[in-house]
Image (cartoon, rainbow, N blue to C red):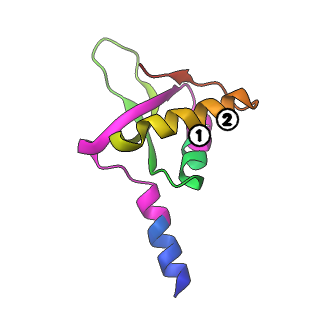
Amino acid sequence: MNDANDENDELELAFVPPGEREAVRNFDDEATAEIAAGYLRANGIAAEVGTMMIPGLQYGLAVWVRKDDATAARDLLQQAEDEGGPGPELVE
């Protein structure tokens, strides 16, 4: 029974509704983006990897979180970077 609850929790942490999204980091490769999203999920922040579709800019990958979690997500990713993790580009 706990397995079903754990699976639901994992699904909730892997999806961010489009109307509630904010990109917190850009990445050049999917593996690094997924590592960052996994780190956020492990810390209780829902995170999703997807493309940045901004007219006139090269499409890249971004980690999306709920707008309410954006500051905490940026802080966690910055902390990981400061401790020697990958250094993805900040989204401003």
In the image as oriented, which residue stretches furthest toward the left? 19
Q: State the separation of the CA atoms marked 1 and 2.
A: 9 Å
> Residue at 44% across / 22% down in the picture?
91
> Residue at 28% across / 44% down in the picture?
20
Report whether 50 appears left or right of 82: left
Q: Quadrant of residue 3?
A: bottom right
Name the residue that disc number 2 marks: 80
As rendered, which of 86 and 53 lies closer to the eye?
A: 86
> Residue at 40% across / 32% down in the picture?
23
In this picture, is 24 found above or below 49?
above
Residue 22 horizontal/vertical position (percent)? 35, 35
Name the residue that disc number 1 marks: 36
Residue 56 at least partly seen: yes
| Mark 2 residue crowding within 10 angstroms, few (<14) / some (14–19) / many (20+) | some
- Element at badge 2? helix
Residue type highlighted by circle 2: Ala
Image marks 1 and 2: residues in contact by CB distance under 8 Å? yes
In the image as oriented, which residue stretches furthest toward the top? 56
30 within the magenta span: yes
1 within the magenta span: no
As rendered, which of 74 and 48 lies closer to the eye?
A: 74
Residue 30 at least partly seen: no
Stretch of the chain drawn in magenta: 10-35
Residue 32 horizontal/vertical position (percent)? 62, 35
Residue 11 horizontal/vertical position (percent)? 44, 63
Residue 39 horizontal/vertical position (percent)? 61, 46
